[in-house]
Amino acid sequence: MSTLFIYTIFLLGHLSVYFYFKNNLSLSSNVLEYNNKSNPQLTIVETNHSQKVTNSIANNKKMLLQKNLRQLEFINEFEMYLDEKSLNNFSIEFLQEFEQIKIEAQLSTLKATSQLNNVVKMAA
């Protein structure tokens, strides 16, 4: 039971970091859109600032992708641990919840990857 509690805390930590960066990224993009609409003639300082913000967003996306990949690696290690043990020892609800967490982690990793690919496509 204590391991389940530890894994739950670990998952909540990852989710809180994910939602923090998700909200931070959406706020940054909204500020950029507002600045571009309100003043179409940007000065050099504002342009440099927007480039720094864009680079910061890209770095945050890379960090988010790394965290998602670490979470998938952890899930993989845990699956290998479960394979060594008898699955009859674990409840069906736990296994279903674990499978749902695995799917969500895979989807968030794919989403972060596609966001990074879109940045590369736009740069090209």
Image (cartoon, helix red, strand yellow):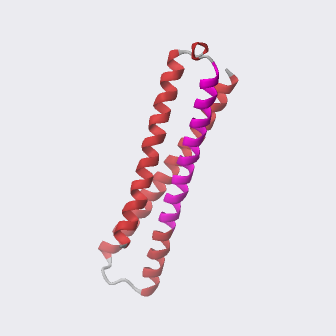
Question: Residue 57: horizontal and vertical position, in percent?
Answer: 48, 64
Q: Quadrant of residue 80?
A: top right
Question: Which residue is at 65% across, 27% downward?
Answer: 5
Question: Residue 88: horizontal and vertical position, in percent?
Answer: 58, 13
Q: Magenta span: helix, strand or loop, mainly?
A: helix
Measured along the vertical axis of the image, is residue 63 above or below residue 76?
below
Q: Nearer the viewer, residue 104 or 24?
A: 104
Question: Residue 38: horizontal and vertical position, in percent?
Answer: 31, 74
Measured along the vertical axis of the image, is residue 105 above or below residue 64?
above
Question: Which residue is at 44% across, 35% downward?
Answer: 103
Q: Which residue reaches farthest bottom?
A: 44
Residue 69 belongs to the span the image colors magenta = yes
Q: Which residue reaches farthest top?
A: 88
Residue 74 belongs to the span the image colors magenta = yes
Q: Which residue reaches farthest front?
A: 84
Question: Residue 70: horizontal and vertical position, in percent?
Answer: 59, 46
Q: Quadrant of residue 7?
A: top right
Question: Which residue is at 61% across, 16% downward?
Answer: 86
Direction from residue 85 to residue 32 in the image, left or right: left
Direction from residue 109 to residue 66 in the image, left or right: right
Magenta-highlighted residues: 56-85
Question: Which residue is at 46% across, 47% downward?
Answer: 109
